[in-house]
Image (spheres, rainbow, N blue to C red):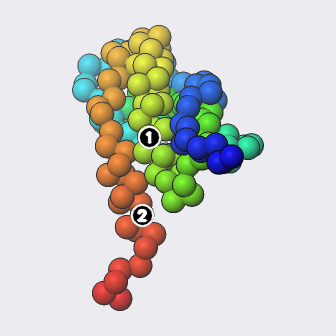
Amino acid sequence: MTEPEQTPLFSIEKIYVKDISLEVPHAPAIFLENDAPETNIQIQITSRHVGDDIFESLLKVTVTATLGEKKTLFLVEVAQGGVFRLQNIPEADIEPLLSVACPNILFPYIREVISDLATRAGFAPVILQPVNFEALYASRRQQETPSALN
């Protein structure tokens, strides 16, 4: 008898909010301001192996809106997590899946949470623009790998 075919499997086991924070340090006075805010967005992707063929991927987004001389309008920080099963996946393909495919799955969820938090805090919704996680991954890999010219 031949060995059963080991078909690669990539599945979502769970999607959840791991951490959430909203700060409006200058409320209620900040609501009297009419200036357009400046928005800074930071994205962080991490992952870890948590069990047999099970991985956690975290997409953390921090949105800081400021007015004038760096007066903070609001700060929203969300860590959207996902538990993924990667079974019979070649070792070389695991990191790209965790760094590109998983954040692509998590992004719509975190976008909704951030927009909802800003609205509940009394501000206009924050609509995050699409993110090219493949380009972020390629850029990070390029920074980690020493240049062939050196």
Q: Position of residue 123 (x, y in %)?
A: 38, 15
x, y percentage for residue 32? Answer: 35, 15
| Residue 89 x %, y % | 55, 49
* Residue found 54% across the figure and 55% down from its top: 90
Q: Secondary structure at mark 1?
A: helix
**Left or right: where 91 falls relative to 1:** left
Q: CA distance from mark 2 to mark 1?
A: 16 Å
Under mark 2, the amino acid is Arg
- The numbered mark, 2 or 1, whose residue comes first in the sequence reads 1
Tell me the element at label 2. helix
Figure check: 31 above or below 43: above
Where is residue 132, by image quadrant? Answer: top left
Q: Residue at (45%, 31%) from the top-left corner?
A: 105
Outermost residue on the front side: it is: 1
Q: Residue at x 40, y 68 (%)?
A: 143
Report whether 129 appears left or right of 27.
left
Looking at this view, is 149 or 7 the one in front? 7
Residue depth check, mark 2 versus mark 1: number of the one nearer the observer: 1
User: At label 1, which amino acid type do we have?
Assistant: Ala
Rendering coords of residue 72 (x, y %): 43, 32
Query: Between 21 and 17, which is closer to the camera in this rendering?
Result: 17
Nearer-the-camera pick, 11 or 120: 11
Note whether 40 is above or below 94 in the view shown.
above
Determine which residue is flagged by label 2: 141
Q: Provide the residue designation for mark 1.
A: 101
